[in-house]
Amino acid sequence: MEELILQLKKQIIEALNLEDMTPADIDENAPLFGEGLGLDSIDALELIVLLEKEYGIKLTNPAEGKAIFGSVATIADFVSKNRKK
Amino acid sequence: MIRVIADNIMSPLGLTTGENLQAILRGESQLRVRRGLFGLPEDFCGSVFDRDMVPEIADTQANDGGFSFFERLCIASAAKAVAQSGIDPAAEDVIFVISTTKGNVDAISRDLMAPEAYIGESARRIAGYFGCSNSLVTSNACISGVCAQIAGVRALLGGRFRYAVIVGADVLSRFIVSGFQSFKALSPEPCRPYDAERCGLNLGEAAGTIILERCDDSDADQSTWQFVACSNHNDANHISGPSRTGEGSYRVLRDLLAALPADRLAFVNAHGTATLYNDEMESIALDRAGLAATPVNALKGFYGHTLGAAGIIETILSMHAVDNGIVLPTRGFASQGTSHRLNVSADVRPTDRRAFFKILSGFGGSNAGIAYRKGGDR
Amino acid sequence: MNVTITPEGVKLDRAIVATGSLAEIYRAHIGDYPKFFKMDSLSKLGFLAAEFLLRDIPPEQKENAAVVLFNRSGSLVTDRNYQRTITLNDNYFPSPALFVYTLANIVTGEIAIRHKIYGETAFYILPERDDATIERVVADMLLTSSPTMVVAGWVDWLDENNYIADLKLITN
């Protein structure tokens, strides 16, 4: 899980152009949206693409994303249970 | 005074304004589920020209002149309106204003460096077909069709031009449809503006032309449609998400109302894309502007969102509705689904008023509106 | 006031005030707006140019400003980048963050968001740079609109070695 969390942090930084951030700057339990990293609706859509591209997980209903994208830890949990690659 | 002297709509519902109006009054739409179109891996529901109709759309010269489908559509629509108006489009006092979001973008799917993708040059080719050397492109995403009318009005008021030929069009492609799919913005079935069950927009193809003329006030009579006011405001909030307070749209409505009070309006023809957030935002803006009781309609349930054409064809249909003493129906609307209640016209309704607002909102936080009135409006 | 940004650097009324890539200029002169890195190149360019024109203007004067920009290429460089994400069906991952920038007017929205500008934002595409047309369109705007000030000009991105923003702040 540790490894997956680190990998996700790197992928999120890359996919969302979080310039000047390192994995150490992201607390895996902190909220990604609103406060926390201050991500927005386009970032949420881009995270859906990331899950499909890197892990073969297709989210058809963006509303599902709300719970999954709570924090890096919740994403890691979801990925570990649903990944196809 | 700026008046309207000709118009045309070309869509999958018909190749003249009259055919389009009649199709709407019969409740028709060409919104259908499209499987495998443009080689897309996912279905979408859209209103698309039958590509076999293409040769009929423009005359031989345009078909043989190396013009793209997008350009032929613009030429065909403009040609009908130009013929109706009787103007000489090659005269120096004519300007073509082209409204499109993506023009020939599909060309880059064959060659990333395709020169046809430069929209300004595409507009020059379209105007050049008519012998006109003055062209301008408004590229403001979904509000382009109203921005083009505003640009045309200003070009005439500025005194250099007497006629503005305002042409709006977009054609669908793998590029455009996949982008809206990536935004999870599309409804799998015909869209439902302002409805409680709405779940996204449809995309559609169309072209429309309005020709404006600068003339003396004495040239107006009971049948003359004239420009009253226009406005453009940004939400200053987000590049894709509609404002939660409807700020830009509200400011547009406030400007238009200062020129034309609500009691003179037959209706407000709204954007009404049927996405959750757009329609909610518009309900807030209309309510804030004191227009909750004014009839509101949206035409996306007939055409889908026709992008650069939307502001133009929806303005034309609004004028023809008033000419016929009616408010057009909002296809797809059944029960109110916005937090602020609006007076949505679900079905055809009679009206004796002779003025309306056309409003749009879109990506980039942009909002625009234009007001027209017909002679005899008190 | 006039600002130009090219690969040579930033000139304010013809005096060079900054040099380097857009990211270097951002880091040296702005630094407090991480959303900058999410923008496409056209938006970064227009955003930086507007920053030099507007950063010392009080907010109440900016609320009813207008932003009117022109170019030749539209958003074509970003269009190509987006196209690369959809060309093949077996590597088909359309990117929403790229798609949103395939509209040239997004740069005007980015400037409006940064400076809380609620006035007119507009983008026009011309077949080539033509300052007489730009001046005429901006002057004609004032026939139906009364902004407190106007940010207007040319902003076009071709590649890292070939870009220009040439904007004016017009006040009365």
Image (cartoon, coloured by chain):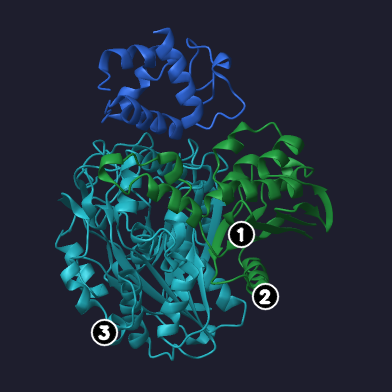
Identity of the residue drawn at 61% across and 38% down: C36
Give the image location of residue B118, x and y in percent.
47, 66
Identity of the residue drawn at 51% across and 22% down: A34
Label 3: chain letter = B
Identity of the residue drawn at 35% across and 73% down: B71
> In the rendered image of this protein, which colour is used for chain C?
green
Mark 1: which amino acid? Leu
> In the rendered image of this protein, which colour is used for chain B?
cyan
Relative depth, front residue between B195 and B130: B130
Residue under disc 3 on the same chain as residue under disc 2: no
Pointer 1 local density, CA inside 10 Å: few below 14, some 14–19, many at least 20:
many
Whichever of callouts 1 and 2 sits on the residue coming sooner in the sequence is: 1
Mark 3: which amino acid? Asp
The disc label shown at residue B373, or none: none
Q: Which residue is mark 1?
A: C69
Q: CA distance from mark 3 to mark 2?
A: 35 Å
Q: Which residue is mark 2?
A: C132
Q: CA distance from mark 1 to mark 2?
A: 14 Å
Give the image location of residue C46, x and y in percent.
64, 51
Mark 2: which amino acid? Ala
Relative depth, front residue between B127 and B292: B127
At numbered mark 2, what does the secondary structure look like: helix, strand or loop?
A: helix
Label 2: chain letter = C
> In the rendered image of this protein, which colour is used for chain A?
blue
Q: Which residue is mark 3?
A: B59
